[in-house]
Amino acid sequence: MGCQSANEQITQDIDALGLKCPEPVMLLHSAMRKIQGGERVRLVATDPSTERDVRNFCQFLGHELLHFDREDTRLIYVIQKRV
C-alpha cells in the first residue's frame, strides 16, 4: 500500500517505537478520538503485531488505512478517520 498523497496533511504523528501490544493501538485510538473526520494520523511502530492490529482496528471502526510501509524495523501507517 503506497500512496504518496497519503502522507500529505498529517494531523498527528504517533511515535510508538519500542512499545508493545496493546500500547500502539491504544495511542492510535486516543488520537483518532481527538481529530475530525477526514483527518489523518501517522503511526510509527516497531511491534510486528501492529500489522494485524492496525488493520483490524481500521476495519472494525471504519477508518481507512491509506498507507503502510516498512523501513528496517519501523512500521509506518497512515490512517484517515472516517467522515
Image: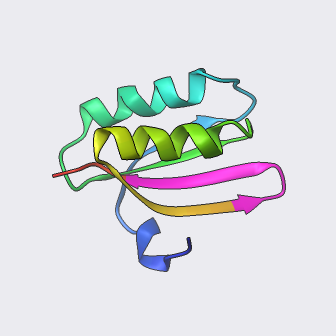
Find residue 12 and report its image quarter: top left
Range of the magenta residues? Answer: 70-79
Relative to 47, is 25 on the left or the right?
Answer: left
**Dominant secondary structure (helix, strand or loop) of the stretch shown in magenta:** strand
**In the image shown, does 58 or 31 lie closer to the viewer?**
58
Quadrant assignment for the N terminus: bottom right
Magenta stretch containing residue 71, yes or no?
A: yes
Magenta stretch containing residue 15, yes or no?
A: no
Estimate the x, y position of residue 67 in percent, counting from the top left: 51, 64
Find residue 70 and report its image quarter: bottom right
Estimate the x, y position of residue 64 in percent, counting from the top left: 35, 56
Identify the coloring. rainbow
Relative to 15, is 40 on the left or the right?
Answer: left
Whether 26 is drawn above or below 80: the answer is: above
**In the image shown, does 36 or 56 lie closer to the viewer?**
56
Relative to 12, is 34 on the left or the right?
Answer: left
